[in-house]
Image (tube, rainbow, N blue to C red):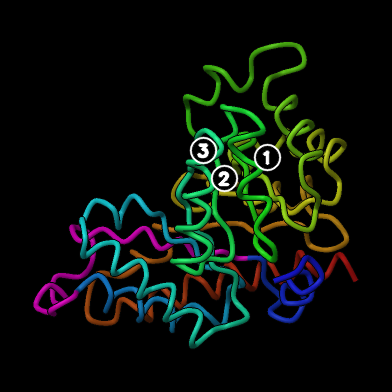
Amino acid sequence: MTYAELSSFIKKQQSFLCVGLDTDINKIPNHLKQEENPCLVFNKAIIDATAPYCVAFKPNTAFYEAMGVKGWQNLFDTITYIKTNYPHHLVIADAKRGDIGNTSGMYADAFFNQMNADAVTVAPYMGSDSVKPFLSVKNKWTIVLGLTSNEGAADFQMKGNPELYKQVIKEVSQWGSKENTMFVIGATKADMLKEIRTIIPEHFLLVPGVGAQGGSLQEVAAHGMNEHGGLLVNASRSIIYAGSGSDYALYAASEAMNIQQEMSTLLGLLK
């Protein structure tokens, strides 16, 4: 998916919602545990229910890796299901990889070519040779950790003059372009988005932290939106675990629709 296609799809869907598929066997409805593959059944139902209201899906690979071989198969099958049934939706493998060049190249091959994800999240701490192998894959997106939403972000990211996260965003933005690079910016740091936009006014931002983590969608849009939309706001637990009974998918759809309607109003400001 190109930059222009993503922007167009956002406007068509009237949404910049990314649904996080952080599927935990301990949290899915109990009746599904009788299924041969409960997590995959759960994922398919959530995807079908929320696809009309979102533009992207983001499986966090940790939840699949924790299940071993079956989990990796579930990840592959989940991505394949999205690609087959909702080919216009962006699929983000939230893997947070980053290593020396040849290893990063293998990670890029794993997620882009073997898993067929459209995008993968990357940790830039080791520098350019850990990120550029991802950027070298054509027609794929590299999403670099910029300013995260967790409490520990203050330990390193917000230290220095200028702060480390600003140095990282400025430097990494020069390794690729707005066409293949996004940045993770936590919704709980929404007040910092305005200054971040002075560094990268055109890039798309993946924004976790809205929903269960308490980030404000209105603040994120006010400080982070650009003329192309420029945002993918992720919500995971607040959507996929909105219901716990046999009608769990209906609750997920309702929660996603509520967010989409709010996003539609915010996108109206771009017209």
Density class for disc 1 (Cα within 10 Å; few <14, some 14-19, many ≥20) is many
In primary-sequence order, the first of circles 3 and 1 is 3
Q: Residue at x 61, y 50 (%)?
A: 134
Secondary structure beneath dot 1 equals helix
Residue numbers of the magenta segment: 17-37
Q: CA distance from mark 2 to mark 3?
A: 27 Å
The disc at residue 215 is 2
Q: Is the C terminus in the top left, top right, bottom left or bottom right quadrant?
A: bottom right
Question: In which image quadrant can residue 73 be found?
Answer: bottom left
Identify the residue under disc 3: 98
> For the residue marked with disc 3, what is the amino acid?
Gly
Q: How far across and how far down the image is residue 57, in percent?
A: 51, 67
Density class for disc 2 (Cα within 10 Å; few <14, some 14-19, many ≥20) is some
In primary-sequence order, the first of circles 2 and 3 is 3
- When the figure is inspected, residue 253 is found, relative to residue 173, above or below; the finding is below
Instruction: Name the residue nearer the viewer: 235 or 61.
Output: 61
Identify the residue under disc 1: 190
Q: Which one is in front in this view, the residue at disc 3 or the one at disc 1?
A: 3
Secondary structure beneath dot 3 equals loop
Badge count:
3
Q: Are marks 1 and 2 in contact (CB under 8 Å)?
A: yes
Q: How far across and how far down the image is residue 263, in percent?
A: 68, 66
> For the residue marked with disc 2, what is the amino acid?
Gly
Question: Which residue is outermost to the front?
Answer: 102
Instruction: Name the residue nearer the viewer: 237 or 232.
Output: 232
